[in-house]
Image (cartoon, helix red, strand yellow):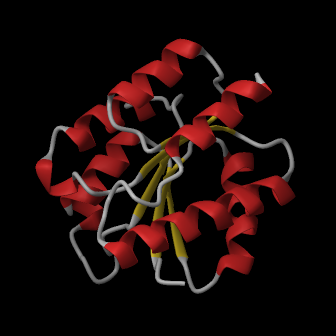
């Protein structure tokens, strides 16, 4: 496994807890959780509390919840994709929203995948394993479009709704 760092934006403590549990069997991949989109932007820009790049390494995968209090996941997605230095950063929307407007916005603004949050932590572990394998394959090949199973994941999420 090549993936070493994932940044996850989630304001719900229960969902953050389940993600931490899902990452236990995925070691050595490290998970950093922030609670708002503004924290993601600060983290990626390396400002404020995130200025120490050794303590806060650049993530190889960004996972965003959509509904957050200050800056939403959709706003972060648009911000990240408007900054060229993050063009190759894989972004997964992991949310409870199955609204087609959210899915369409995410796809049009460069999300690599859109997933409706699984109801069981076992499912979340499997989803994270597939995503990490996809990011690893992408990094190995050097082709940003090769490995991320965007359409499959978006279709699976849409079928659940």
How many marks are shown on the rendered structure?
0
Task: Judge from the rendering whether residue 159 lies leftward or rightward of residue 143; answer left or right.
Answer: right
Q: Tell me the quadrant of the picture where the N terminus can be found.
A: bottom right
Q: Is residue 98 visible?
A: yes
Residue that appears at 70% across and 36% down: 156
Task: Judge from the rendering whether residue 35 lies leftward or rightward of residue 161; answer left or right.
Answer: left
Up-down relation of residue 55 to residue 109 (above or below): below
Q: Tell me the quadrant of the picture where the C terminus can be found.
A: top right
Up-down relation of residue 36 to residue 66 (above or below): below
Taking depth in this image into account, of 73 and 56 the one nearest to the observer is 73
Taking depth in this image into account, of 121 and 47 the one nearest to the observer is 121
Residue that appears at 59% across and 35% down: 154
Q: Is residue 72 visible?
A: no
Residue that appears at 29% across and 63% down: 49
Taking depth in this image into account, of 30 and 147 the one nearest to the observer is 147
Choose top left, top right, bottom left or bottom right for residue 55: bottom left
Up-down relation of residue 70 to residue 115 (above or below): above
Residue 159 placement (x, y as % from top left):
75, 26
Residue 58 placement (x, y as % from top left):
30, 70
Residue 17 placement (x, y as % from top left):
72, 58
Residue 112 placement (x, y as % from top left):
44, 45
Choose top left, top right, bottom left or bottom right for residue 132: bottom right
């Amino acid at each position: 496994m090549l993936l070493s760092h994932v940044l996850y934006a989630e304001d719900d403590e229960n969902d953050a807890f389940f993600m931490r549990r899902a990452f236990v069997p995925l070691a050595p991949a490290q998970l950093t959780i922030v609670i708002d989109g503004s924290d993601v932007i600060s983290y990626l820009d390396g400002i404020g509390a995130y200025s120490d790049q050794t303590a806060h390494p650049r993530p190889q995968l960004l996972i965003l919840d959509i509904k957050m209090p200050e800056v939403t996941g959709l706003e972060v997605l648009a911000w990240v994709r408007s900054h060229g230095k993050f063009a190759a950063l894989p972004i997964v929307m992991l949310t409870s929203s199955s609204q087609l407007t959210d899915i369409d916005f995410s796809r049009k603004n460069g999300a690599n995948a859109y997933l409706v949050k699984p109801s069981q932590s076992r499912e979340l572990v499997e989803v994270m394993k597939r995503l990490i394998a996809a990011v690893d394959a992408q990094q190995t090949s050097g082709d940003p479009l090769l490995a991320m199973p965007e359409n499959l994941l978006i279709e699976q999420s849409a079928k659940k709704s």
